[in-house]
Amino acid sequence: MKLKSAIAVIFLVFLAFGCKKPSNEVIFHKSHETKKQDAPFSDAVESNGFLFLSGQLGMDHGTRTLVEGGIEAETRQCIENIKAVLEHHQSSLDKVVKCTVVLKSMDDFAVFNKIYKEYFPNKPARTTFAASGLALNANIEIDVIASK
């Protein structure tokens, strides 16, 4: 009988302290980039322990222009921008669970993929496609979902 009581107490403690119910609160975060705070979208939205990031371009946020060097340079800058947003919200690239990648041309797929593998060795789920036009005539845009 003592064993059953002990198991019941452990179970109640686990329920009370070890098993948090996810918050249904949705937080629309302002951009950490001062020049982007008036944008009509959030850089990150937080819900149920996940961060949903808006698409990032290969833009140097200091100059507000695309980096030079084509798909390779833009891909690196794009992922560095994602990394900065995640770090600002206490997350990181290794917590990314889903990526959506939009390329200007599927001809850039191999170069993009080579760089992508450097940053995402965990292999998050991914969708990649090409579109006829991206903002600022960019070569790539990536958005991610990451756990917090």
Image (cartoon, rainbow, N blue to C red):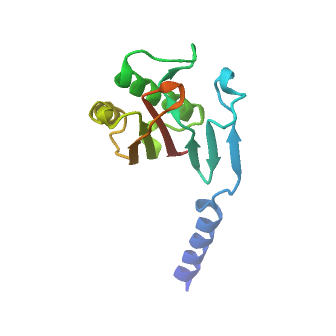
Residue ID at (53%, 28%): 84
Residue in the foreground of this view, choosing between 66 and 21 = 66
Residue in the foreground of this view, choosing between 77 and 70 = 70
Q: Locate the C terminus by quadrant.
A: top right
Q: Quadrant of residue 37?
A: top right
Q: Position of residue 52 (x, y in %)?
A: 57, 45
Q: Position of residue 68 (x, y in %)?
A: 42, 15
Q: Quadrant of residue 88?
A: top right
Q: Position of residue 114 (x, y in %)?
A: 28, 32
**Tag count:** 0
In the image, residue 42 sits, relative to residue 5, either above or below, namely above
- Say whether residue 35 is left or right of residue 61: right
Residue ID at (39%, 47%): 126
In the image, residue 148 sits, relative to residue 67, either above or below, namely below
- Say whether residue 25 is left or right of residue 20: right
Residue in the foreground of this view, choosing between 10 and 84 = 84
In the image, residue 147 sits, relative to residue 120, either above or below, namely below
Residue ID at (33%, 37%): 106
Q: Position of residue 89 (x, y in %)?
A: 60, 36
Q: Locate the N terminus by quadrant.
A: bottom right
Residue ID at (59%, 62%): 19
Residue in the foreground of this view, choosing between 116 and 92 = 116
